[in-house]
Image: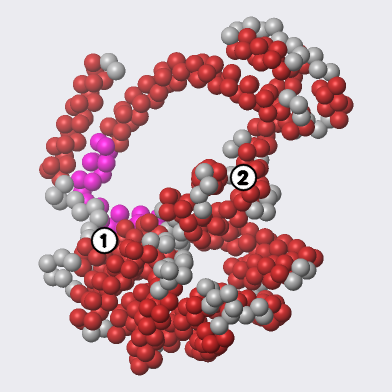
Amino acid sequence: MSKVSRYSFAALALVVLSLCSSCGKHIDIRPSRQVPELLDEAEKLTSQSRYDEAVGLAFEALKESESEDADRLLQAKSHLTLSKLFLQTSRDSLSWEHAEAAEGLAIRVKDDSLLASSLLVKGKICSYSNFTIDNNRDDEGIAYLEEALRLSELNGWKGISAEACYFLCETYVNKNRWNDVLDRGFYVKAGEWLEKAEKLDEGRQSARSLSTRMRYLRQGDRTDEAITFCNRVIEETPEQDFLKRYQIYDHLTNLYLKKRDVTKATEAHQNYSYYMQLYMRQKGDDILQNLQTEYQTELKDRQIRSRTGLAFLLGVFLVLALLAIVQFFRLNRQISIKNKSIESIARSREMLFAVIAKDLYDPALAGIKDSQTLDFIRKWPTMSEDEIRQRCASLSEGDAAMDPLVVNYISDLMISKKKSLGTKGLSARELEIIALSKEGLSDKQIADKLFLSPRTVSNHKYRIYSKLEVSGNTEMLAKAEELGL
């Protein structure tokens, strides 16, 4: 960087600092938002599966509610929102901590609705945390859920009552999980809670209703009844409800496999894949529309909140940023030119050795389709493997003398592998999940590592299966190894 550019850069920095000190007190770029607004926005982000952003807004709401004029009711709502978010992202200990805080505040402000919701979350946590027979909390969860149901029935809150009944059914199903022989008492109790929940739900086949009934029927080994139920739900479900349809076809696939009806299981799986792709496309369109709406709203807000000196301040920042970008690209270009040849030489030997060692004795793996070329390569061993390695090493050292057959073979191999990998269309997140799966991590461990929910990781894996044209995790890892991922 020349002396002139350094001086100009420093001068602009001083101008910016002086403007910030003089104008900063008068420019209100983003005024603080009210707690209800923050919680509403967090709920909207949750519906879009943007959990990290939603958690940030909920914490901001909690901080605002704990200010000097503290509002315990808003504190309770903020804690409850955080508890639900942490439960959805499988962080049970944090969810429990905020649920207890919400419960305590709800008791102090005498708000039965918040109290019932807090107890409901605690009951869910007890139901979800049953990993072994030694650490199950079924009875504790039942107590919380029954108390939440009692409060909601006293106040006529059908939504909370239905949700409590669904989880009471699931908890009694969980109690049978540890029994070698089905306990009919637990099973009958689960059925009673399920019937009550569906009655309160007024016949709506919600996602919770479907999953709970399927668990109940499958535990009772009532496969035919479950198949009939699924087919009836499909007939009643609108064609555009892709989410419900792919969930039902997933259940049908497992049920037909249990009956060993391969034909119907295959047909159900094809429908499952079809509707899952439609749902993912529909969800992507919705997210794009929401982002566009948010952008337009934010743009209008910025225009309303702008002040007289903001345009000049932004102009100075732009000039300063432009100078920084120019200097960055100059330095980056110089570094790139110096390092390009070094990187190419460093990678070439490893790439050549890896390619030849993997595909030397089976050129079909390289993507070569022509049968005559395959026969020619297999039947005419012009050089041994050691000789080819020596020629490759000499090639990386600048010796251009190399057998034409090996040159053509490596060229075809590299081009075909590049095309094969390029057509898979894997995203950066999907490649990251493949890499973590190769380390032997489960879906839950991957979700914790990437700060996602296990359901989101599962959805990513289904898209990976579709792109790699495989049907399971083992085949996915084998395909990834084959493609060099």
Q: Earlier in the sequence, mark 1 or mark 2?
A: 1
Q: Quadrant of residue 335?
A: top left
Left-right relation of 157 to 11:
right
Residue located 23% across and 84% down the image: 110
302, above or below 196, in the image: above
Q: Position of residue 55 (x, y in %)?
A: 34, 60
Per the rendered image, the range of residues in magenta is 293-317
Whether 51 is among the magenta residues is: no
Q: Quadrant of residue 96?
A: bottom left
Task: Give the label on residue 25, or none.
Answer: none
> Which amino acid type corresponds to the residue marked 2 in the rendered image?
Leu
Q: Residue at the location (63% across, 49% down)?
A: 474
At a point 18% along the width and 27% down the height, the residue shown is: 11
In the structure shown, which secondary structural element does the residue marked by tag 2 occupy?
helix
In front of the other: 196 or 40: 196
> Relative to the observer, which residue lies in front, 324 or 65?
65
Dominant secondary structure (helix, strand or loop) of the stretch shown in magenta: helix
In the image, is residue 29 above or below residue 82?
above
Q: Is residue 444 above or below residue 399?
A: below
Quarter holding the C terminus?
top right
Q: Which residue is mark 1?
A: 60
